[in-house]
Each structure stands twice: as structure tokens, then as C-alpha cells.
């Protein structure tokens, strides 16, 4: 009863009451959430497009003594005569030197080669018609393979460095502005990247594209969450989570249809230019407008919302908005997003520990998620690598449904613990399954990705619920920025398979297990309102 009375006393700041008055999740909010589908799908595609552009293909040395270089195929019945084999496959950059004998026309006998003389080569035959940056920039042979792994690492470094800045800009200038500018800029850099002629410039543009586009999903997510009341927060967030894998599946489909990386990049980045029209089509977050004291803009959007939802905005709601905007202006903090408020986070022990624990959870979840995503193209033979990727990413769709019910009935911390423990279990157990049991490995990867995706969706909701409105986007971006350490390490962790095949999976499983325990150091937010002020956040 005391909590109820406290809520009534603080009703002048109850923004959930305002949203329930104009329609908590009516036609207007549904329309705005639908408008977020395009940027969410595109941001998902851009986050992992390096998996396609930096993918490898099987290749071998060309043998001009036995084949015409402009008309040849990868598999030949005489390969074992001309090229040393490793693990049942021809070595990529080695071949046998020739003996002094000449080859009969149309034949390639074993006697033509000297197996004691292994030499390198500078011409190659590729297994497929895929033309990725590996072939464009000549990134061949084991000693250069790190350059392909660096593409993913540089992508994540770009996101890591710019996340706090874009989060601060989002809290300063609005979620919608950062979303549109980020998406359009990312499209421009991505289209330029498709046609550069050097590895160095490609990496520069990879960095810039990630830097400006990395927080577009976060901005879209916060917009959707802030458009609705606490009652529909789980529904809105899980709907977004169910939309996200559409971008990853689209990535796999486009990779299969467009083997040339230039056409592939052009196709996925061009649609983002359409987001320039969102300045006139999509409204700003009313919570952010109120938190920054912009009464006129907030009232205009709320009245439009009420009209399209066939509701009437009451005098009490107008008074709540007026009081909240007046408080924001009177405090001189514009929704608490100034430097002094950020310092307050680091001066408060409760919020500082919360920030550290939240960041550790982000590192673990991101490391596991991107690690399994990159590894998804390697769980079967290369001819099916994109099919493997698509089926593994499709695990995120049922994950969103599972997330909805888990958040609704068992709370955030328990849900995170359950999903990460499941992810850890199947990932570690998969290392004991013989490689020829392809179906079992696919199923285990599917379950692992489903659990990890569910954890990711829960973490987004959780991260949005533990910070105040004026700093929500900034602090979520700080946690996500630190989480980028996980995505930087994931592509490099895959390289450890050269030393011990299952070592990357053991690392991913261990990280998931650790996260399952760390989550209990954060406050449970199930059934609680979004904190509007720093004091609201401390009281969670």
C-alpha cells in the first residue's frame, strides 16, 4: 500500500500515466515501431557484413604444366601428384617442383613432379566463383590470414571508440537525429568502401562505417522502448529482437545471390539512404523531449498520438507534461545529460558497481554471440556455409518468443542466467561430438545461438531499465562500447582453432557460464517503471 501511495504522490512525474492516457500501444505507436523495422534490419546486416566480405574460399596452386589457367577447375584427379595434401585437402600455397621429364599431351603423370622439392606459387585456382576481398587484395596463404581477421576487429574498434560519443549525442540531440545521421553516413561510407582499390583504404572505410553506424540499433531500440508505457515495454523490445535476425538472414541470402563483394556491398548499403526521409515521417521520443524540457514538441507529438489512437488527452496529462518540462528546465540539467550528472554515476558506489557489472555482462554476451555467428559458416563444408549461417541466425526468431515469455513471467536476472547456462552447456558439449555428425552439430549450434540471442535481447531490455531517461542512451552505449571488446576478440579467438580445433568453442562456453553468475549482481527490474531521474535509478 505504501508503494501505491508513493506512486500517487509522485504522479506529477508519471510519464506512464500520460502514455496510458493517449494510448499505451495503439495504432500510432505500432506504426512507429513498424517504421523502425528498416533501420533495425539494416543495422543487423551492417554489424556482421564483414563475415561475408572477409570470408575465405578454398584454393590451391595453379599447375600450368597440367591445366590452362583461363579454363580450369579446383578438383582434378591428378592433384595428389602435383600438390602436397594436409587433412585430406590440397595445401593452398605449396606445390611440387617438376622433374626434368616432359608431360604427354593432355596428361599429368606422377613422374612429372619431384615430391622431395616443395615450392611456393604465385598463381591460384579457386574452388568457387566468390570474389571477396581475399581475392581483390591478394590476401592469400596462412601468413596473411590475420589480415582477414583484422577486418572484423577494426570494425569493432570503430564501434568501440565512437559508442560513447554517439550515446552522448543521442541524449543531447535526440535518438531520431542520431539514428538518421548514423544510417545515412554509414550508407555513404559503405558505398565508397565497395569500390576502393586498396586494402588500407578498405580498412579505413570499414572503421568509419562502423563508427557512424554502430549505435543505430541502440537508437532505434531506445526509441521503441520510450514510445510505449512500462506495461508494453517487453512486447516492444521482444518485437525488435524478433526483427533483428531478419537482417542477418538477409545478409546470408544476399551473400549467396551476389558472389562479388562490390555488388554485395552496394545492394545492402543503398537502402539506408531512404532513412533521410525519416526526419519528416517519424517522431522523436516524447520521454526524451520531456526530459530535455521541450514542452511544445512533446505536446504536439502526444496530441497527434491521442488523435490517431482515438483518445483524448486529459488536463491531468497536460499538467504532468508541463510540470516535468518545467522541472527539467528549472534543474538546468536538460534531463540530466550534462557532465555533472555523468560524474554523479561514477561518484555513486551503487551505480558504479552496476555500470561495471553491466559492462562485464555485455563483454561476455557479445563475445559468445559474435563468436558463434562467425563460427556458423564453418560448421559444415564450405559449399553450404551461407546456408549454415542462415539456419543458425534463424535461431534468433524463436529466441525472441522465448524471451517474451521469460521476461514476462520469471524476471530479467533468472532469464539471463538460464539462457547463458544453456548456451554454455551446448557450446562446450558440442566439442565432444565427432565432426561427421553434422546434423547433431547443427542442432547444438541452433540451440546455442537461440539461447545466446535470447540473452542478448534480455540484456538490451535490462540495460534500458536500470538507467535514468536523460542518460539512458549514453550509459547503454558505454556498456555496449565495453562489450565491443568481446566482438573484437571473437574473430581472433576463431584463429585459435589452428592450434586446438575446439578451443574457441570452449572459450565461448566459459564466457557464457561466467555471465550467468555475474547477472545476479544487477537489480531485478521486472514490473518496475523506467527510472526518470538518477535517484529513481538508485532506488531500483
Image (cartoon, rainbow, N blue to C red):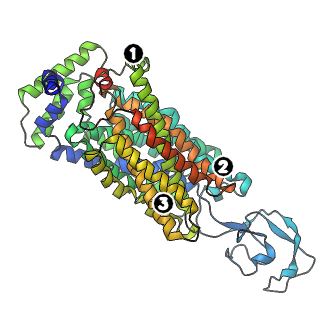
Closer to the camera: disc 1 or disc 2? 1
Q: Give the CA distance from mark 1 to mark 3.
A: 46 Å
Observer-nearest of 66 and 488: 488
Within 10 Å of disc 2 (Cα), the crowding (few <14, some 14-19, many 20+) is: some
Please state the horizontal and vertical placement of residue 372, each as a whole percent of the image.
51, 54
* First in sequence: mark 1 vs mark 3: 1
Which residue is denoted by mark 3 in the rendering? 445
Give the camera-side residue of 66 and 485: 485
Q: Which residue is located at x 80 percent, y 82 percent?
A: 108
Determine whether 420 is above or below 384 in the image: above
Pinpoint residue 426: horizontal percent, then vertical percent: 48, 57
Residue farthest to the right?
Answer: 100
- Check the picture and name the quadrant holding the N terminus: top left
Which residue does the image show at 70% across and 57% down from the upper left? 140
Q: Quadrant of residue 105?
A: bottom right
Instruction: Please give the residue where the numbered disc 1 appears in the rendered image.
Output: 340
Query: Which residue, given by chain and number where applicable, does mark 2 sit on?
Result: 147
Mark 2 vs mark 3, foreground winner is 3
Percent across and percent down for residue 421 are: 44, 49
Amino acid at each position: 500500500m505504501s508503494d501505491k501511495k508513493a506512486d500517487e504522490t509522485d504522479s506529477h512525474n508519471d510519464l506512464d500515466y500520460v502514455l496510458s492516457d493517449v494510448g499505451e500501444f495503439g495504432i500510432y505507436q505500432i506504426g512507429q515501431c513498424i517504421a523502425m523495422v528498416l533501420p533495425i534490419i539494416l543495422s543487423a546486416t551492417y554489424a556482421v557484413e564483414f563475415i561475408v566480405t572477409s570470408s575465405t574460399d578454398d584454393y590451391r596452386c595453379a599447375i600450368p604444366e597440367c591445366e590452362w589457367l583461363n579454363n580450369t577447375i579446383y578438383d582434378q584427379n591428378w592433384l595428389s601428384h602435383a600438390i602436397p595434401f594436409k587433412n585430406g585437402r590440397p595445401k593452398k600455397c605449396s606445390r611440387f617442383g617438376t622433374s626434368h621429364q616432359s608431360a604427354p599431351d593432355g596428361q599429368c603423370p606422377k613422374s612429372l613432379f619431384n615430391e622431395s622439392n616443395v615450392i611456393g606459387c604465385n598463381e591460384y585456382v579457386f574452388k568457387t566463383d566468390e570474389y571477396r576481398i581475399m581475392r581483390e587484395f591478394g590476401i592469400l596463404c596462412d601468413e596473411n590470414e590475420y589480415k582477414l581477421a583484422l577486418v572484423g576487429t577494426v570494425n569493432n574498434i570503430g564501434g568501440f571508440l565512437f559508442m560513447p560519443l554517439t550515446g552522448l549525442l543521442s541524449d543531447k540531440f535526440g535518438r531520431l537525429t542520431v539514428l538518421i545521421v548514423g544510417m545515412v553516413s554509414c550508407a555513404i561510407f559503405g558505398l565508397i568502401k565497395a569500390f576502393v582499390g586498396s586494402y588500407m583504404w578498405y580498412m579505413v572505410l570499414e572503421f568509419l562505417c562502423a563508427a557512424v553506424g554502430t549505435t543505430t540499433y541502440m537508437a532505434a531500440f531506445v526509441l521503441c522502448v520510450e514510445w510505449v508505457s512500462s506495461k508494453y515495454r517487453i512486447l516492444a523490445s521482444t518485437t525488435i529482437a524478433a526483427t533483428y535476425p531478419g537482417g542477418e538472414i538477409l545478409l546470408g541470402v544476399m551473400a549467396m545471390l551476389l558472389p562479388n563483394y562490390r555488388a554485395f556491398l552496394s545492394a545492402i548499403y543503398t537502402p539506408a539512404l531512404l532513412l533521410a526521409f525519416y526526419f519528416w515521417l517519424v517522431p522523436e521520443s516524447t520521454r526524451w523531449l520531456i526530459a530535455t524540457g521541450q514542452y511544445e514538441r512533446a505536446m504536439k507529438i502526444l496530441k497527434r498520438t491521442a488523435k490517431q489512437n482515438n483518445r483524448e488527452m486529459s488536463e491531468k496529462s497536460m499538467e504532468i507534461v508541463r510540470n516535468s518540462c518545467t522541472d527539467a528546465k528549472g534543474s538546468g540539467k536538460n534531463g540530466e545529460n550534462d557532465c555533472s550528472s555523468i560524474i554523479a554515476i561514477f561518484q555513486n558506489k551503487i551505480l558504479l558497481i552496476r555500470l561495471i557489472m553491466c559492462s562485464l555482462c555485455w563483454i561476455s554476451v557479445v563475445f559468445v554471440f559474435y563468436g558463434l555467428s562467425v563460427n556458423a559458416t564453418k560448421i559444415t563444408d564450405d559449399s553450404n556455409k551461407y546456408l549454415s549461417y542462415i539456419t543458425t541466425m534463424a535461431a534468433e526468431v524463436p529466441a525472441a518468443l522465448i524471451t517474451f515469455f521469460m521476461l514476462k513471467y520469471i524476471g530479467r536476472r533468472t532469464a539471463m542466467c538460464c539462457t547463458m547456462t544453456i548456451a554454455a552447456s551446448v557450446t562446450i558439449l558440442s566439442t565432444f561430438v565427432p565432426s561427421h555428425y553434422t546434423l547433431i552439430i547443427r542442432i547444438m549450434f541452433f540451440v546455442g545461438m537461440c539461447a545466446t540471442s535470447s540473452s542478448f535481447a534480455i540484456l538490451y531490455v535490462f540495460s534500458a531499465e536500470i538507467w535514468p531517461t536523460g542518460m539512458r542512451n549514453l550509459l547503454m552505449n558505454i556498456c555496449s562500447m565495453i562489450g565491443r571488446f568481446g566482438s573484437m576478440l571473437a574473430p581472433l579467438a576463431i584463429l585459435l582453432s589452428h592450434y586446438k580445433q575446439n578451443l574457441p568453442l570452449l572459450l565461448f562456453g566459459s564466457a557464457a557460464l561466467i555471465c550467468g553468475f555475474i547477472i545476479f549482481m544487477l537489480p531485478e527490474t521486472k514490473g518496475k517503471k523506467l527510472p526518470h531521474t538518477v535517484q529513481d535509478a538508485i532506488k531500483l
